[in-house]
Image (spheres, grey):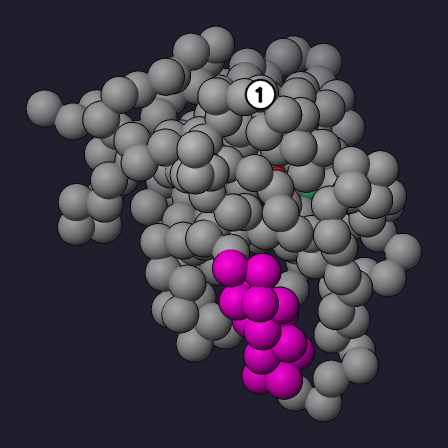
Amino acid sequence: MADTRKRVAVLISGRGSNLGALIDAAAASDFPAEITLVISNVPDAAGLDRARQNGISSFVIDHRQYETKAAFEDEIDARLREAAIDLICLAGFMRILSTEFVEAWRDRLLNIHPSLLPMFPGLDTHARALAAGVKEHGASVHFVRAETDQGPVVAQSKVPILADDTPDMLAARVLDAEHRLYPIALKLVAGGKARMVGERVMIDDSEASGGVTAGATAP
Ligand code: GRF
């Protein structure tokens, strides 16, 4: 039988724990995606080891080796097309992608962000959530748009903020939630259960569980 699983590339810059969660989830025989390619812009990113251990082809495309952002992104794009990639997951990829790249992969490009978007886009989300005094925090998986950390949300996971939390304690709780959230969101998108209606994501068959809220359930 032909393999109908979507071919996914994961773009990383560091630790790669979300990459690991996606690799683990994709090992299940009913998961509708396979992690086919890993690209890091950082040569010694720890996540590259995880890719190698799992026999996934990986490339370093170091932005510092390219004169322009366009040349850097052209190289990424060429690798993605060469590998016949269907979907891209950004997982701690610390370069801001151009509008051209984002539009070329529109609705095929996901990102995970450690906050309940649209709250706290950008960096230091955990410290900012504590400083703001909000009672809940969490993570979001969204389709990428040209504006950083914006775009239609596929799924979100909430975590409580506890009285004695430090940014590190909160970050650890959110990261744990991220590791459950990203596979659920990718499964929805790769399995064709997440539909764009305008700029909203509708979920045809929500698998939301364990504190994960996935898009809006279709009527
Ligand atoms: C995660 O917190 C993710 O939400 C953010 O960057 C971090 C990456 O962590 N975009 P890892 O490399 O997946 O461990």
Q: Position of residue 84 (x, y in %)?
A: 51, 59
Residue 80: say if magenta: yes
Q: Within the image, what quadrant is residue 177 found in?
A: top right
Residue 36: say if magenta: no
Q: Residue at x 24, y 40 (%)?
A: 195
Q: Quadrant of the C terminus?
A: top left
Image region (quadrant) for ligand 1: top right
Q: Where 7 falls versus 69 (above or below)?
A: above
| Residue farthest left in this picture | 219
Q: Which SS type dominates the magenta stretch?
A: helix
Going by the numbered disc 1, the residue's amino acid type is Ala
The one nearer the camera, 159 or 106, is 106
Q: Where 57 falls versus 97 (above or below)?
A: above
Q: Position of residue 102 (x, y in %)?
A: 44, 66
Q: Is mark 1 within 8 Å of ligand 1?
A: no
Q: Secondary structure at mark 1?
A: loop
The one nearer the camera, 71 or 139, is 71
Q: Give the residue pinned by disc 1.
A: 28
| Residue farthest bottom in this picture | 67
The one nearer the camera, 186 or 113, is 186
Q: Within the image, what quadrant is residue 13 found in?
A: bottom right
Q: Which residues are magenta?
A: 70-84
